[in-house]
Amino acid sequence: MEYTRLGRSGLSVSRLVLGTMNFGPETSEDDSHAIMDRAHGHGINFFDTADVYGGTKGRGVTEEIIGRWFATGGGRREKTVLATKAYLPMGDWPNESRLSALHIRRACDASLKRLRTDHIDLYQLHHVDRDTPWEEIWEALGILRQQGKVLYFGSSNFAGWHLAQAQEAARSRHFLGLVSEQSFYNLMTRWIELEVLPAARHYGVGVIPWSPLYGGVLGGVLRKQREGGASRGNSARSVDVLAKRGDAVEAYEKLCADIGEDPAHVALAWLLAQDGVTGPIIGPRTVDQLDGAQRALAITLDGGTLAKLDELFPPPAPNGAKPAPEAYAW
């Protein structure tokens, strides 16, 4: 396993992040525990979850599954850099969502209880709250750190200017600020290259891409459909994407075949090659899927392959792979 620092912090994390969103709704508790054990076996120490995860099983279920795994001992908690999130509704009453000081306090305490731990290593703001001032948010987060309940803070789904807001507000309080940003980023969705990635690099914020396979579209969906599989390829998103960009996806799968690599592994390797990316979140539903994803760490994409990928999935700018404002100006 390869390790890197999380943003400008001194925290060492694996370059593949174990996503747990499937634990509960898609993957049984026993299988979830087996996946987490195997992740440690591969050297993956960075686990990501959220208070709201659980799907049809109920909000909080995923954290509870992880908590029961920690409770089995064997150094499982000590070996894990644990990341969770708060923002989305955990109930129907006022103050059971968003980023008020009240909700942050209650959400953190509830996550600690479900996770059966005394602290969270990385507490992430799951979304921007435009109605709560940063003074209130940082005061609430600062108290959590003073209490020893949280060590580091991150964001998710922030725009570049939101990162700037957060970091400048933290600077005014002499706080470390955010050390990570979790963004929707993959070959087919490259919008964050305009401003989020440059802002993150400027402020020393590590970027953690979610949905690196674009819901399975970049995981060899056409080949799997031909073989009679790819249930995720029949999702509404996949059907829509393939209708609009099926030629690019087909060419992508051919390119992967030409270099002798699985499309899912190439998509992960491409993200690992991007400047500022800490590591993509992989969300295996089985141990075999987790095992297979390790191949991405061994793939080095040469300049010619990277250029071909840019042709198939162009950067989101008429002036090529340039950040804002050059992307849309001179």
Image: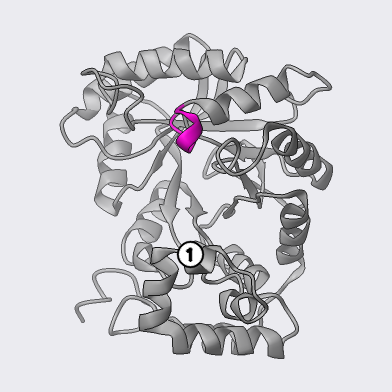
Q: Nearer the viewer, residue 44 or 229?
A: 229
**Residue furthest toward the left?**
131
Write down the quadrant of residue 222 in the picture. bottom right
Q: Position of residue 258 (x, y in %)?
A: 70, 91
Name the residue: 39% across, 26% down. 175
Mark 1 falls on what kind of element? loop
The magenta segment is: 52-59
Name the residue: 48% across, 68% down. 234
Q: How is the image coloured?
A: one colour
Look at mark 1 in the image and give the residue it sits on. 214
Write down the quadrant of residue 141 in the picture. top left
Q: Nearer the viewer, residue 124 or 143?
A: 124
Q: Nearer the viewer, residue 102 or 136?
A: 102
- Residue 31 appears in the rendering: yes
**Residue furthest toward the top?**
147
The question of residue 54 being in magenta is answered with yes
Above or below: residue 207 compared with residue 150: below
Q: Quadrant of the C terminus?
A: bottom left
Q: Position of residue 274 (x, y in %)?
A: 54, 66
Q: Position of residue 100 (x, y in %)?
A: 25, 21
In the figure, is residue 127 to the left or right of 145?
A: left
Name the residue: 78% across, 38% down. 34
Tell me the crowding category of disc 1: few under 14, some 14 to 19, or many 20 or more residues within 10 angstroms, Cα based: some
In the figure, is residue 208 to the left or right of 74?
A: left
Above or below: residue 323 compared with residue 195: below
Residue type at mark 1: give it. Tyr
Main SS category, magenta section: loop
